[in-house]
Amino acid sequence: MSKKKQPINRMGKFFGYDDFNLELSMGEEWLHGDMNFTLVLFRVDRSKSVDDVYGESGKGEIKFFSPVEFKGYVQIAGPDNKTYSNGLGRYLEPGNMTVSLYKHHMEEKDIEISYGDYIGYYETEDRVRYYEVANDGKVTSDNKHTYGGFKAFYRTILCTPVSEDQFKGM
């Protein structure tokens, strides 16, 4: 990959970096100020958690970096009502969480979210539900994550709920 920077001017007649930065700042003001969804990232320290032979870690052996609060737009899917294979038992499974966050905010907070990390979301003032990152959203070259094809500006992270015996927070 080339290290040379090429200015993006495909929409230069109608839209440029100043417009992009203005739109980005207004969006961040709405998301961080008005919506104010606060989440906590528990990033897995893979260098201390994974063994050298199989690249795995056992229960209770996962080590984490210090938790970091960040802002993102949260959407939680409705719960799934499932049955056991024999059809005799039912259980209600919490829905997945989708978090959209600005790439600029991630740079400001110096965070990177990866597959297998954990995210805490305050459902109420005294209850945090924890989710595991199932899709870290690192591919942002699609039209959905760019502003009119101009430049990527956010990521979408898909998370699955975890039980308390899997992760309890810190």
Image: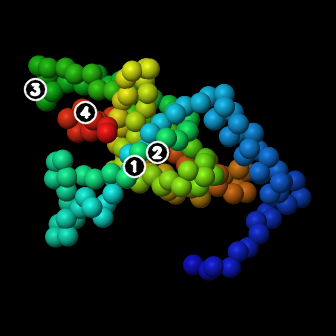
What's under tag 4, amino acid-wise? Answer: Ser
What's under tag 3, amino acid-wise? Answer: Asn
Callout in the foreground (1, 4): 1
Judging depth in this view, the residue of 112 and 7 nearest the camera is 112
Contact (Cβ within 8 Å) of mark 2 with mark 3: no
Judging depth in this view, the residue of 112 and 63 nearest the camera is 63
Q: Which residue in the protein does label 4 denote?
A: 163
Contact (Cβ within 8 Å) of mark 2 with mark 1: yes
* Residue 55 in the image, given as x and y percentages of width and height: 22, 65
Instruction: State the residue at coordinates (18%, 47%).
Output: 60
Q: Which residue in the protein does label 2 denote?
A: 68
First in sequence: mark 4 or mark 2?
2
What's under tag 2, amino acid-wise? Answer: Val
Instruction: State the residue at coordinates (69%, 57%).
Output: 151
Q: Which residue in the protein does label 3 denote?
A: 86
**Disc 1 from disc 3: Cα separation:** 43 Å
Quarter of the image for residue 26 reads: top right
From this viewpoint, is residue 60 visible?
Answer: yes
Disc 3 residue crowd, few under 14, some 14–19, many 20+, Cα 10 Å: few
